[in-house]
Amino acid sequence: MAYECLLSSPDAMMQLSSYVHDHFEDSAKPLKVRITQGGQRSLSQNALYWMWLGELVQQVKAKSGESYTTDDLHEYFKHRFCPSRPLTFGKREITVHSTTRLDSGEMTRYLTHVHEWAIGAGFKLTIPIDSEYRELLERQEQ
């Protein structure tokens, strides 16, 4: 079972602590903890993503002759890798995929999925030396 929360107050920290405590009372199984920054995705992440979409449009055309726009690829990746969220209009609930609502940790995970897809499909994406994404990758390798 997965548990996810946004720590934004001492009360939220107490709820997380309570969850962990209850888990270990009920089970001796270890927990995997991942801490990411919870703020909204950054402009740097967004710029990198749209740069990658532009690179992919060109590489897909060169490799297969198929013409897509950056918006086409954005829709494809959203539906493939973006977490879904419920959206309710009156009594009707729909599921939406939106990168706009991703926090910086979720956006990093999304970028990683897109990057891995591109590599697997034989494409190369630029990761600028001064990008936030490169810094994160380098920190993970240490």
Image: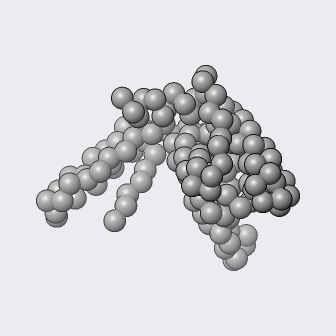
Number of marks in the image? 0
x, y percentage for residue 34?
Answer: 37, 45
Report the residue that reaches farthest toward the front: 63
x, y percentage for residue 82?
Answer: 61, 57
x, y percentage for residue 60?
Answer: 76, 54
Q: Residue 50 falls in which quadrant of the image?
A: top right
Residue 38 appears left or right of 31: right
Is residue 18 among what the camera can see?
Answer: no
The chosen color scheme is: one colour
- Looking at the figure, which quarter contains the N terminus? bottom left
* Residue at horizontal 56 percent and vertical 34 percent from the top: 133
* Residue at horizontal 78 percent and vertical 44 percent from the top: 54
In the displayed structure, would residue 3 be above or below residue 111?
below
Report the residue that reaches farthest toward the bottom: 91
As rendered, which of 99 and 40 lies closer to the eye?
Answer: 99
As rendered, which of 92 and 72 lies closer to the eye?
Answer: 72
x, y percentage for residue 85?
Answer: 60, 62
Residue 119 appears left or right of 141: right
In the displayed structure, would residue 65 be above or below residue 10?
below
